[in-house]
Image (cartoon, rainbow, N blue to C red):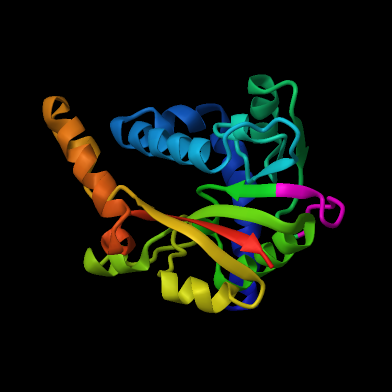
Amino acid sequence: MSGQTQTQTISSLKPYYDQLAEDYDELRFGGSYGKFIHQQEVALLDKLIGSVAGRKILDLACGTGRLSGFASHGLDQSEKMIRLAREKHPDLDFRQGDATNTAFPDAYFDVLFSFHFVMHLDSDTFSQVLTEANRILKPGGRLIFDFPSSRRRKLFRRKATGWHGNYSMNLRELTKQTNAHWTMLSKQGIMALPIHRFPSASRSWFQSIDKLLCRSPLQEWASYIVVEMIKR
């Protein structure tokens, strides 16, 4: 993308989420789709992170603190999102800041995770975020994040419109962008099947099928892919 488009992307995030902050949780995660996504993300972070005790863990682009129970620190551009996150987790260290220039010390965190953030970036900005994550993670530190699957979007012929939620990749593209400084530890899809659209009575059966698909080679056709990488 051009430098102008990249600047518009970054500058658009803050006012957009400032305006949305009060209703964000309900609008994005109050319905059946959002609730399912949230449950999957919580279960995955519980498996990958577990207890925070004794570790420094950053929730990057933490928003309202929806997943910050797995963190010791949170950072977001939106003041209003940060205020809501502090109300949910008064004991955590939340700061307003830029994901490409966080102002944290070098080699400060054991783990950094970020959900529903990379999807709003472009390739250049994503590279800057990766560089900053590499700087603030300790040697051997882990980076966990999600991104929309470009293979699924091509399958359903979704076209990009504007900046919101329109950056997607496949695993080959991600590996090409990260293999100089990161090693892939694990990867998993989220929502290969439209679970939220199935009747409640049969949803648990379809969910078990969805879990198998999201851990299989077909994971690249899930809605989102979550990767866990280690800093070299």
Q: Is residue 121 above or below residue 102?
A: below
| Quarter of the image where one finds residue 225 | bottom left
In the image, taking residue 220 as reference, residue 117 lies left or right, namely right
The C terminus appears in which quarter of the rendering?
Answer: bottom right
Q: Is residue 191 above or below residue 196?
A: below
Is residue 64 at all visible to an observer of this figure? no
Indicate the position of residue 218 as horizontal and vertical percent values.
Answer: 26, 62
| Foreground residue among 50 and 147 | 50
Is residue 229 at all visible to an observer of this figure? yes
- Label count reads 0
| Foreground residue among 187 and 64 | 187
Indicate the position of residue 92 as horizontal and vertical percent values.
Answer: 74, 28
Indicate the position of residue 8 as horizontal and vertical percent values.
Answer: 61, 63
| Quarter of the image where one finds residue 32 | top left
State the residue at coordinates (51%, 35%).
46
The N terminus appears in which quarter of the rendering?
Answer: bottom right
Q: Is residue 201 magenta?
A: no
State the residue at coordinates (32%, 67%).
159
In the image, taking residue 228 as reference, residue 199 lies left or right, namely left
State the residue at coordinates (58%, 41%).
17
| Quarter of the image where one finds residue 15 | top right
State the residue at coordinates (47%, 57%).
186
In the image, taking residue 219 as reference, residue 1 lies left or right, namely right
Secondary structure predominantly adopted by residues drawn in magenta: loop
Give the residues drawn in magenta, as a range: 101-110
Q: Is residue 87 above or below residue 178?
A: above
Indicate the position of residue 64 as horizontal and vertical percent values.
Answer: 60, 32
Q: Is residue 169 above or below residue 55?
A: below
Q: Is residue 102 magenta?
A: yes
